[in-house]
Structure formats: C-alpha cells, structure tokens
C-alpha cells in the first residue's frame, strides 16, 4: 500500500466497470483501505474471480452486481441495491468504458448510439442517482474517468475520443450543481494503461515504441497508478478539489 487514507475506512464506494482492468485495480485499492466496495460489471466470471481474490486478500468481499450499463434502469437499481445493503454511497467512480477501434466510414447510427451508451450516457445517470444519497449523508466524491486519447488526436476511435472529451464537460457542470451539497466532482485522464485487455489486443513492439516516444517517463503505466489517484480524490485529503482534471499519462499529453 503506497498511501493510507483513514477517512476511507468504512465508506461505501460504488464503481462501474469494477471487475477488471483499471476498475478492478480500483476495487482492490479501495478494499485495501477498508472501504465497503460495490461494483457493477458486464463480465460476470472476471468479476466473481476478482471479488473472491479481494476477499482472500482483505477479508472483506466486495458486492459484485452484474449489470449492462446500457440499461439505465438496471444501473439505477444496482446503485439503490448497493446503498440498501452497504449504506449511503460516499464515493462514485464512473469508470466503465470500452475503447473499441472504428473507422469513420464504418459508423452507423446504431453503432454510434451503442458507443455513446457504453462510454458516456451511464455516467450522467449514475451521478443523478447518487446525488440524493450523497446529499443525505452530507457530501461525497464523484470521479469520472476520461482519457488522453482526444488530446493526442488518435485517429482510429473517433466516437470514443468524442465521448471521453465530453466527460470533463459533465464534471464541470455537475460540480457546480452538486457543490452546495458538499459533493466534489473530478475527472481522471489516464494515458496508455497496460491492462490485460490492452496487452491482448494492442501490445506489440511498435506500439510500445510509439507510447514511450510520447511519454516523458519511460515506464509502463499500470492500472494501480490510476487507482492511487482515485483514492486521493475520494478521500478528505482532496476536500477542496472539484471540477478539475487530473492526468496519469507519464507526461504524454
């Protein structure tokens, strides 16, 4: 454990896409801090394995709720179930997304709508759902996951890039709307994070050379690097940080 945040112990944390990748690292990191973690994910087998692993490591088993975030009603139900079973949610991590590659000429309206639903829409409705819960408890922290992809002008994922660029607009708008209730809202922009999915789909010698050419620091960014920043933004250590972007990209963007 790199840093300890005693105020996170016992706090209820809800993470979308918390079954693997960056979200999985966050599930583990918050559990290690003694938080009560609930997460949703569409990957049920990976989520179950992660929950069992965290249970063995920490003695506390995260609440794992299968959910397809394209179904907003199911997401809302999962948030309410987590609050009913664990207590009022203090931290929402809007992490879930999918960076499938696509060419502009291949995009249909159906594909457009699906990518927006996967990468953007659920963040608004999750924040909407937790607002009265956080207001009731006297405050909270919402952390929205964006990406540097739109800043480096990558060309093979235009809808994903647009979705991720819009997330900080959401952060800034609801930070103003929610601030009176003591709720902070911030954005994390990861760079090239070496999740298992990234390694399986994209990793090759040329890609690694391209990434290192962009980064100032010549080392791979691990999911745990992003999780550590999320811990800080969730804790009272960042109590006056809101409406801000925080980047974890080794200096690329």
Image (cartoon, rainbow, N blue to C red):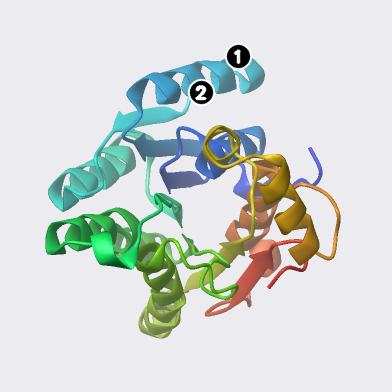
Q: Does residue 141 sit above or below 41 in this rendering?
A: below
Q: Residue at the spot x=57%, y=64% of the render?
A: 188
| Mark nearer the N terminus (2 vs 1) | 2
| Residue 221 appears in the rendering | no
Q: CA distance from mark 2 to mark 1?
A: 10 Å
| Residue 165 appears in the rendering | yes
Badge 1 is on which residue?
A: 56
Which marked residue is nearer to the observer: mark 2 or mark 1? Answer: 2
Residue 224's disc is: none
Q: Position of residue 250 (x, y in %)?
A: 77, 61
Q: Does residue 29 sit above or below 189 in this rendering?
A: above
Q: Position of residue 190 (x, y in %)?
A: 61, 59
Of 82 and 188, which appears nearest the observer? 188
Left or right position of 119 against 184: left
Q: Does residue 198 sit above or below 52 in this rendering?
A: below
Local crowd size for mark 1, using a 10 Å CA cut-off: few (<14), some (14–19), many (≥20): few
- Label 1: element kind: helix
Q: Does residue 48 sit above or below 232 in this rendering?
A: above
Residue 50's disc is: 2
Q: How many marks?
A: 2
């Amino acid at each position: 454990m790199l840093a300890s945040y005693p105020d996170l112990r016992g706090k209820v944390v809800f993470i979308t896409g918390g079954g693997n990748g960056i979200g999985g690292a966050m599930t583990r990191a918050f559990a290690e801090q003694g938080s009560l973690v609930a997460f949703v994910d569409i990957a049920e087998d990976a989520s179950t394995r992660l929950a069992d692993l965290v249970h063995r490591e920490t003695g506390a088993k995260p609440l794992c709720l299968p959910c397809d975030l394209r179904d907003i009603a199911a997401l809302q139900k999962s948030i309410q179930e987590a609050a009913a079973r664990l207590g009022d949610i203090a931290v929402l991590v809007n992490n879930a997304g999918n960076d499938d590659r696509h060419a502009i000429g291949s995009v249909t309206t159906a594909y457009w709508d699906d990518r927006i639903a996967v990468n953007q829409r659920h963040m608004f409705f999750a924040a909407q759902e937790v607002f009265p819960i956080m207001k009731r408890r006297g405050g909270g922290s919402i952390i929205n996951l964006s990406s540097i992809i739109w800043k480096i002008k990558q060309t093979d994922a235009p809808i994903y890039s647009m979705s991720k660029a819009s997330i900080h607009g959401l952060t800034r708008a609801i930070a103003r709307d929610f601030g009176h209730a003591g709720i902070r809202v911030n954005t994390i922009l990861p760079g090239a994070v070496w999740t298992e999915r990234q390694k399986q789909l994209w990793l090759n010698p040329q890609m690694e050379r391209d990434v290192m050419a962009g980064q100032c620091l010549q080392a791979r960014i691990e999911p745990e690097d992003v999780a550590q920043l999320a811990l800080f933004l969730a804790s009272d250590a960042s109590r006056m940080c809101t409406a801000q972007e925080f980047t974890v990209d080794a200096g690329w963007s």
